[in-house]
Amino acid sequence: MLSSRPSARGNTIGRLKLCLGVLVLLPALVHAREQATLSGRVIAVNNGQGVAQSAVTLTFATVSNGPTAITVFSDEQGAFRMPLHVSTIPADASVAAHKLGYKQVDPAAAVQVKSGAPAGSYETRLYLDPVANIAEQVPASAWLAQGSPGDAKNITLTSCSSCHQVPSPKMREYAAKIEAVRGGPDGDRKAIEEWRKVVRHESWRTIVKYMRSHHYSVFPLESAMNLDAVDWPTAQNADYNFFNARQGEVVASYLAENFPRSTAFLHNDAYDYGAALGVSPSTVIREFAFPAEALVRELVPAPRSPYLWGADVRRNLLVRLDPRNGATKWIGVDFKGSTGPHTIAPDDDGNLWVTMVDNDQFGRFDPRTERWRLWTLRPSSLPDAASMAGAAIVHDMSIDSRGHMARDASGNIWLTMVGTNQMGTLNPQSGYIAFYDTNTIAGFSPINHLIYSTVLSADGQRAWYSQVNGSVGCIDTRTKKVVGLIEFPEGTGPRRMARDNAGHLWVALFGSGQVARIDMKQGRVIATFDLPDRAAAPYAVTWDERRQAVWVANANSDAIYRLDPRSAKVTLYPLPRQMAYLRQLAIDQDGRLVGTYGNYPEGSGPSMGVLIDVGD
């Protein structure tokens, strides 16, 4: 019998070979560690001191390899160090510093090779000057911060911010034109103001009508339900819309009475983030530009895949993004017609599951073979109509604590059906499809409820669902009956949910700017956390098992929140650009946050994938 134990001589030779191997590999390791960097300091011109926690962004005008922009943050002395993916910074790249309350003195800061440093080392100095009026710097949410709190404000946020930030720059421009309207005799201030009140209300009612029609922009350009294909009376029918007629009037009245008349309230210290910044010198945010006409709602990692995967709802495509080099591949849905890929989630095997808002489709995509399998989910109660009246709108699928697609004990996937305010089930093995009623609210059509997110309990026996204009409920997956219902005040806006591994359901309250924690066993809210900016419009929450924290993706505040459930402490991570509308956050295997900017309609805000190394 041969012994498996090596001889002493063999050990010596093995150690020698190992040592020689290390000696041979050492130069390569040293070279790999000499990563190209951009370093420098952010300085306040008024006192010469460093500006802490300033965002420093390097943007590449022409991208051939890697992200479009990289952002890091300065330390207490204003110093920063940015890792680069290129050994040479091209001449058309630009670097800028930003911090709320400051303006960069020289927008064309020079980047120079660092003297005496290894190749690929660059340095720069950036100078900031304090500013009094921060109206052009604050997020959209700041414009609503001074408005009267209450149900009307929450309804306005829930109804208006579902598609884009409110108020967007176009809305602010529109409001300024309203204030420029004159009426009554010259010099009669009272008459002029009374006239303006009439103009304000009618002007914002017009915007509500405009919003109703643009709800059809959730469908792809080729859809039979695209706005160009739907007649005006149908587009204005509140029963086929995400908010009813009464809510539309609430929105118009609230904006008419509360929209800021000027930017004076944004002078000096009138607005701040309301929370400590969580960023550090180790925080790195990488952004990857998508085409302006793309509308990638969500971006997720998948097990055993080096890529990030997104759903482009407007162009009927999936996108495969390689974060190592920025390369993208656009993949069509294997369907003859419009589909509108909407929500995307991986499973444990690395497949991608995709809900589609058009033509009642739900699909599984295998990234290895790039093959699709599709199922049609269409409740029989829907009429044959080319409008939202005939749309199933397959919205979200059941997920687990990691955001992965989850099935109940019978192998069923649960899905929310916006068009009928129902929950649907699909058994991929048998192909069996069924639909089940949820709770209803008087005065609301099925679509008005806006049923949204769904999360499976750890044992698979409860499928929880949210309604943006209603409640959070749960269905027993065995009896298919609603067995729990948590009602929220109108306008609170329970939207995207997540669960942890301790039996808690976390709910983003879109309209009220809060996060609710529900005991899934007891079926009741056990805690509600106020976010620092109550107009932030928290769209989604994500459970982070590694950090034991909840991440909050905001639509309206150009920032991400981190909520520590034990201390109830909230920290803020500012995003590098304005109109940074987030609909979801995922977490990759390295603990990085993955997201994408998704304003409707396409082109109304940045179209970019986002990868955030928190730096902790």
Image (spheres, helix red, strand yellow):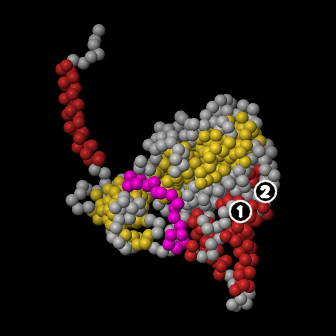
Q: Quadrant of residue 39?
A: bottom left
Answer yes or no: do the residues labelled 2 and 1 have beta carbons within 8 Å?
Answer: no
Q: Position of residue 346 (x, y in %)?
A: 56, 40
* Residue indicated by mark 1: 152
Whole-number angstrom distance, CA of label 2 to CA of label 1? 20 Å
Crowdedness of circle 1 by 10 Å Cα count: few (<14), some, many (20+)?
many
Residue 66 image point, x, y percent: 41, 53
Q: Is residue 10 visible?
A: yes
Residue at screen point 44% across, 50% down: 614
Tell me which segment is drawn in magenta. Answer: 266-283
272 sits left or right of 410 in the view: left
Could you tell me the amino acid type at mark 2? Asp
Looking at the image, which residue sits at the far bottom? 186
The quadrant in which residue 581 appears is bottom right
The N terminus lies in quadrant: top left
Residue 520 place in picture, x, y as percent: 65, 38
Judge whether residue 58 can be spotted in this image: no
340 or 300: which is nearer to us? 300
Residue 214, by quadrant, is bottom right
Q: Residues within 10 Å of mark 2 (few under 14, many from 20)?
A: some
**Mark positioned earlier in the residue sequence (2 or 1):** 1
Residue 30 magenta: no
Residue 273 in the magenta stretch? The answer is: yes
